[in-house]
Amino acid sequence: MKLKVNIDGYIDKYGGFSLAQLKSIVESDTSTEVIQLLINSEGGDVVEGWAIHDYLLNLQKTKKVYAKVEGMVASITTIIVGALPKENVTSTKNSTGYIHNPYWMPKAPEPLESKDLSRLAESLEVEEKKIYDFYLTRLTATAEEIKHLMQNAIKLTAEKMLEIGLIGSIENSITASFRNQLPIKAQIKIENMATQFTDEQKSWIENKFNTIKNLFKLTIKNQVVKLEDGNEVFVETEDGDFMGKRVFLMEDGNMTDTPAPDGEHVTEDGRTIVVSGGIVTEVKEAEDVEALKRELAEAKANAEALNAKVTELETAKAEVETNFENANREFLNFKNQILTGKIENEQDFPKGGEPEKVSAKAKAIEIINQNKKK
């Protein structure tokens, strides 16, 4: 069985995807021999990225590890992907990538002396050379091209990533991920650079953080819906309304880019989602299940009663048809007696001796008189 791991978003041990998370996922299922990394990351912390890189190198001694880019592979995430053999890395057609020089970004306003800046510059230069040397051995691009790409952070298409050897193949996929693709630069953490924040600085950070949280509320939300048959789909919706939204299949608890098949999909709570071309075209609200059961049972009982009535009528019809045939035969015999004067063998004559010769006229008069007595 294949274990799928989503490396999604920012690489960082403080709230992003981290080495600890990767270890936890992998070590939770030690029986798995194949691991599939699903990549959609803009990069993040350099130190954490190298740590994940080294862990993957060691992991491949006991397991087969593959990676698939589903949207973006940028910054330090390219180092993570670079831990795998090129032929084990694929990308969807519309994915993109970036490689660039690392840089430091202050977390809040803080004073820096010249010696601090010099130490920071030295640390960045060391990290830059480390990344450049790695690309030089990993990629098929020339040294000049690698420097050009790193200095300018040029956007890489899937075809360009294949050309320079960042990936080994391009998957013939209709679409990649539809998440925002922002070239966020990698950060390098410099020890002992943090300062004690003042109350004013803490207030400034909190306001900025709240602003960011509000911005994220506007992004697409994927609502997972469990179906009656036990399968799951997810709908791209911002407000919880499914109408007109795209709906995709889930696989082993992970989101895929495969549209849900056309038709009606009954949810666990009784709603019916109608899908056409991967889009929700109608949502039928759940009805009273017990009422439906009662109606079904009543309809079934009525159907059985109707079937019994039909059988009864068919029997009665057959009996009437038989009686009619017998009566019709008797009438024809009687008519034949009147017209020919002949007496059929089946007539009820007196027993013994020769039958009396009775004329047709006399027989008719006899029958009429008998009817009058009745």
Image (tube, rainbow, N blue to C red):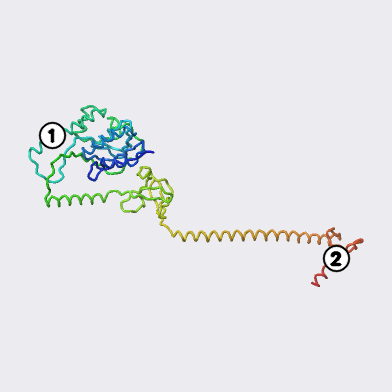
Q: What residue is at 15 percent from the left and 40 percent from the top?
A: 191
Residue 328 in the image: state x and y as whole percent.
Answer: 76, 60
Circle 1 residue: 122
Where on the picture, by quarter, is residue 68? Answer: top left
Q: Is residue 170 above or below residue 268?
A: above
- How many marks overall? 2
Q: Position of residue 43 (x, y in %)?
A: 24, 39
Q: Nearer the viewer, mark 1 or mark 2?
A: 1
Q: Earlier in the sequence, mark 1 or mark 2?
A: 1
Q: Is residue 48 above or below residue 346?
A: above
Residue at far right of view = 353
Q: Which residue is mark 2?
A: 363
Q: Residues within 10 Å of mark 2 (few under 14, many from 20)?
A: some
Coordinates of residue 360 in the picture (x, y in percent):
86, 63
Q: Nearer the viewer, residue 227 or 27?
A: 27
- Assign the C terminus to one quadrant of the image: bottom right
For residue 250, above or below residue 300: above
Q: Is residue 216 left or right of residue 224?
A: left
Q: Quadrant of the N terminus?
A: top left
Q: Mark 2: which amino acid?
A: Lys
Please, what secondary structure does the residue beneath circle 2 have? helix
Rendering quarter of residue 7: top left
Identify the amino acid type marked 1: Glu
Left-right relation of 214 to 338 = left
| Separation of marks 1 and 2 at Cα, in angstroms | 140 Å
